[in-house]
Amino acid sequence: QVQLVESGGGLVQPGGSLRLSCTGQRILFSLYTMTWYRQAPGNQRELVAAITSGGSTNYADFVMGRFTISRDIVKNTVYLQMNSLKPEDTAVYYCKASKPQFPPASDHWGQGTQVTVSS
C-alpha cells in the first residue's frame, strides 16, 4: 500500500524557519508531481508549492520568495523549506503525489503535519 508520511512541523516564532519532509513508501516520487498543500481551520485546502516529475516548480503567490520545494530522488523525499514564517502560515501541511494524466481519485495524500507560527 502506498504511504506518504510528512514530518518536520512544529511551533515556531514569526520570522523563523522550518523544513517539512514528505517520504514515500511503495511509490517513486520521481514519477509524480509532488505538491504541498495546507489547510488552516475554517479554510479550504490550498496549494502551496509543487514540483513536477521533470523538476519544474511553481508556488502560490503568498509563499513566493519565502518557501522552497525540493526533492531528493535517492531518498525518495520531498521537502518544503519555509523561511520568514508568518502567523498566517499556521496550518496543517499535506503532501500529495499525483500524475496529471490520471484522475484525482488516484492521488496519494499524506496525513499532514501541523505548523504553528506564534510568539
Image (cartoon, grey):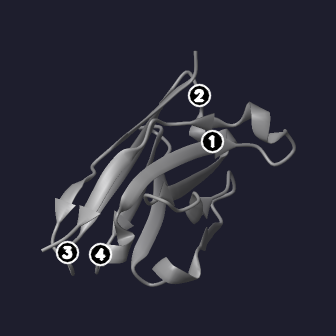
User: Which is more N-terminal, label 3 or label 2?
Assistant: 3
Q: Nearer the viewer, residue 74 or 76?
A: 76
Left or right of 111? Residue 108 is right
State the separation of the CA atoms marked 3 and 4: 10 Å
User: Which is more N-terminal, label 4 or label 3?
Assistant: 3
The local secondary structure at tag 4 comes to helix
Q: Which residue is mark 1?
A: 97
State the separation of the CA atoms marked 2 and 4: 33 Å
User: Which is more N-terminal, label 1 or label 2?
Assistant: 2
Tell me if residue 114 comes above or below residue 25 in the rendering: below
Q: Which residue is mark 4?
A: 87
Single out the mark in the foreground, 3 or 4: 4
State the separation of the CA atoms marked 4 and 1: 27 Å
User: Which is more N-terminal, label 1 or label 3?
Assistant: 3
Q: Which residue is mark 3?
A: 16
Single out the mark in the foreground, 2 or 1: 1
Tell me if residue 102 comes above or below residue 10 in the rendering: above
Place residue 83 in its image quadrant: bottom left
Please state which amino acid type lies under the numbered disc 1: Ala
Q: Residue at x 21, y 81 (%)?
A: 15
Please state which amino acid type lies under the numbered disc 3: Gly
